[in-house]
Image: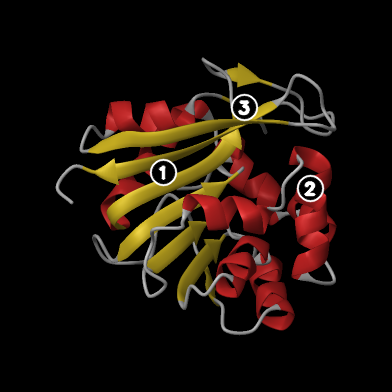
């Protein structure tokens, strides 16, 4: 499944994003979150995943260069995986961070078997998928998750498109956790929290956790 958004992210625009997301260290990546949200990404993960066994299998959909996964490794998680459509980003993830299982792959066709992971997550990735295409992504995330879906995405009560670096059709905010649960009622929302963006007043992110009912 090839979409306009995938084509953009696989091209020069995506390469420029990857360059902006390449940090000298995890500490520098965490500093970005502190300046934006008042708390580091590692602290957010430590708080939200406190009860998750460190041997849990975790997949990040849209991992880019692996910054999020590196934070999880520092917290003691030993089985972290990532997929991204940008080949250059995956190559950089292998150079920048050791022990990351990252491969080229699409959210529309996640290359793992059913219910392989204990937790599947995205971090400001769903916002870049056209609303009409999200159903397939939700389906794939639900398919490969045996227990939890975790997200951190721009929030609005309903779909709202916003310009992204002067471009249209590349960024939407919405209530993504609710949308996943609506389309896949086997997953129920167990926790939500709003994070205010300090550097962009009025912009909010919602962090949410969904759990499979059968667990």
Q: Badges 3 and 2: C-beta atoms under 8 Å apart?
A: no
Q: Earlier in the sequence, mark 2 or mark 1?
A: 2
Q: Tell me if 91 is positioned left or right of 150 in this view.
A: right
Picture quarter containing residue 213? top left
x and y, in percent, of residue 4 in the image: 61, 39
Element type at mark 3: strand
Picture quarter containing residue 94? bottom right
- Residue annotated with mark 2: 34
Distance (Cα) linking label 3 and label 2: 23 Å
Who is closer to the viewer here, 108 or 184? 184
Local packing at callout 2 (Cα closer than 10 Å; few below 14, some 14-19, many 20+) is some
Distance (Cα) linking label 2 and label 1: 30 Å
Q: Could you say which disc has been placed on residue 172 in the image?
A: 3
Q: Which of marks 3 and 2 is nearer the N terminus?
A: 2
Who is closer to the viewer here, 177 or 31? 31
| Colouring rule applied to residues | secondary structure
Distance (Cα) linking label 1 and label 3: 15 Å
Local packing at callout 1 (Cα closer than 10 Å; few below 14, some 14-19, many 20+) is some
Instruction: Name the front one of labels 2 and 1.
Output: 2
x and y, in percent, of residue 58 in the image: 42, 65
Q: Could you say which disc has been placed on residue 137 in the image?
A: 1
Q: Earlier in the sequence, mark 1 or mark 3?
A: 1
Q: Tell me if 165 is positioned left or right of 100 in this view.
A: right
């Amino acid at each position: 499944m090839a979409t306009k958004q995938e084509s953009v992210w696989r091209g020069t625009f995506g390469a420029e994003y990857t360059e902006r997301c390449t940090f000298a260290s995890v500490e520098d990546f965490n500093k970005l979150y502190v300046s934006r949200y008042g708390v580091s990404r590692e602290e957010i993960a430590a708080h939200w995943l406190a009860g998750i066994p460190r041997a849990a299998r975790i997949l990040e959909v849209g991992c880019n260069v692996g910054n999020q996964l590196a934070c999880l490794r520092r917290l003691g998680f030993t089985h972290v995986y990532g997929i991204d459509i940008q080949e250059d980003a995956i190559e950089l993830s292998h150079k920048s961070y050791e022990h990351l299982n990252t491969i080229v792959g699409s959210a529309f066709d996640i290359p793992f078997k059913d219910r392989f992971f204990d937790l599947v997550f995205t971090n400001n990735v769903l916002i870049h998928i056209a609303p009409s295409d999200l159903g397939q992504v939700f389906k794939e995330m639900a398919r490969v998750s045996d227990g939890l879906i975790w997200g951190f995405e721009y929030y609005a009560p309903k779909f709202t498109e916003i310009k992204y670096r002067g471009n249209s059709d590349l960024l939407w905010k919405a209530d993504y956790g609710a949308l996943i649960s609506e389309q896949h009622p086997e997953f129920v929302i167990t926790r939500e929290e709003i994070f205010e963006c300090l550097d962009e007043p009025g912009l909010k992110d919602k962090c949410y956790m969904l759990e499979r009912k059968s667990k």
